[in-house]
Image (tube, rainbow, N blue to C red):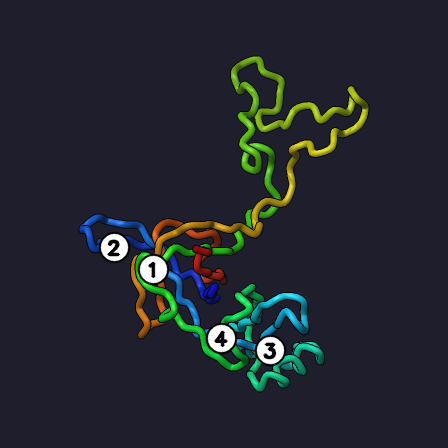
Amino acid sequence: MSCAIIGKKLGMTQIFDHRGYLVPVTVVQAGPCTVVQRKTKENDGYSAIQIGYGKTGRSKRNSKPLKGHYQAAGIDPTRILKEVRIAEDSEYKVGDTITVERFKASDRVTVVGYTKGRGFAGVIKRHGFPGKDAGHGSHEYFRHGGSIGCRTPKHTIKGMRMPGRMGTNRVTTRNLRVIMIDPEKNLILIQGAVPGWNNGFVMVQKTNE
């Protein structure tokens, strides 16, 4: 049975594991999450659950269909709502609460988040271009991107790496190891770095065995 939980990335630190090695970890404050809807293969064509996380102070701004969705489940509106595929024979039902206690140390997890937004960036920062020679006598712009194909073949080549918006991309990091669980504070410590900024939302899911 696949298990997933939504949380907030608090930041990184380092701790000693059971072998005495110093391990860098990311601290995620995960859950508790509430099952808002259960989808079945008979009614919807696939098996999944919708889980909600966090309280929202803007429930009056929700659309009427979304308000009705929460009212049908008898659950207060949440800030985040995500859908997770599960096995058909899993025991999740509407109203169930998912906490970090469903995970344990040494579990392998997949973390999904969004990278930091960098705004508009040039080709050196965005694509790692080396730039031009900045020595004496150089008449080239140092951070210039070079030719984009306007002379030959007289149009910009499709897929050309150019300046533009950088960051805020959905990233999935797989096969990370859970180091420690703190059920009292709803904390899960994951080895290594996970995508996103501090206080950004991430989804942690057990890696399929």
In the structure shown, which secondary structural element does the residue marked by tag 2 occupy? Answer: strand
C-alpha span from label 3 to label 4 = 32 Å
Residue depicted at x 53% and y 14%: 136
Tell which circle, 3 or 4, labels the residue nearer the N-terminal end: 3
Residue 166 rendering spot, x and y as whole percentages:
59, 44
C-alpha span from label 3 to label 2 = 38 Å
Tell which circle, 4 or 2, labels the residue nearer the N-terminal end: 2
The kind of residue on which mark 3 rests is: Arg
Q: Which residue is mark 2?
A: 15
Tell which circle, 2 or 1, labels the residue nearer the N-terminal end: 2
Q: Is residue 180 left or right of residue 98?
A: left
C-alpha span from label 4 to label 2 = 35 Å
Q: Is residue 31 left or right of residue 81?
A: left
In the structure shown, which secondary structural element does the residue marked by tag 3 occupy? Answer: loop
Whether the residues at callouts 3 and 2 have beta carbons within 8 Å, the answer is no
Disc on res. 205:
none
C-alpha span from label 3 to label 1 = 30 Å
How many residues crowd around disc 2 within 10 Å: few (fewer than 14), some, or many (20 or more)?
some
Q: Which residue is mark 4?
A: 91
Q: Which residue is mark 1?
A: 189
The kind of residue on which mark 4 rests is: Glu
Q: Which residue is mark 3?
A: 58
How many residues crowd around disc 1 within 10 Å: few (fewer than 14), some, or many (20 or more)?
many
In the structure shown, which secondary structural element does the residue marked by tag 1 occupy? Answer: strand
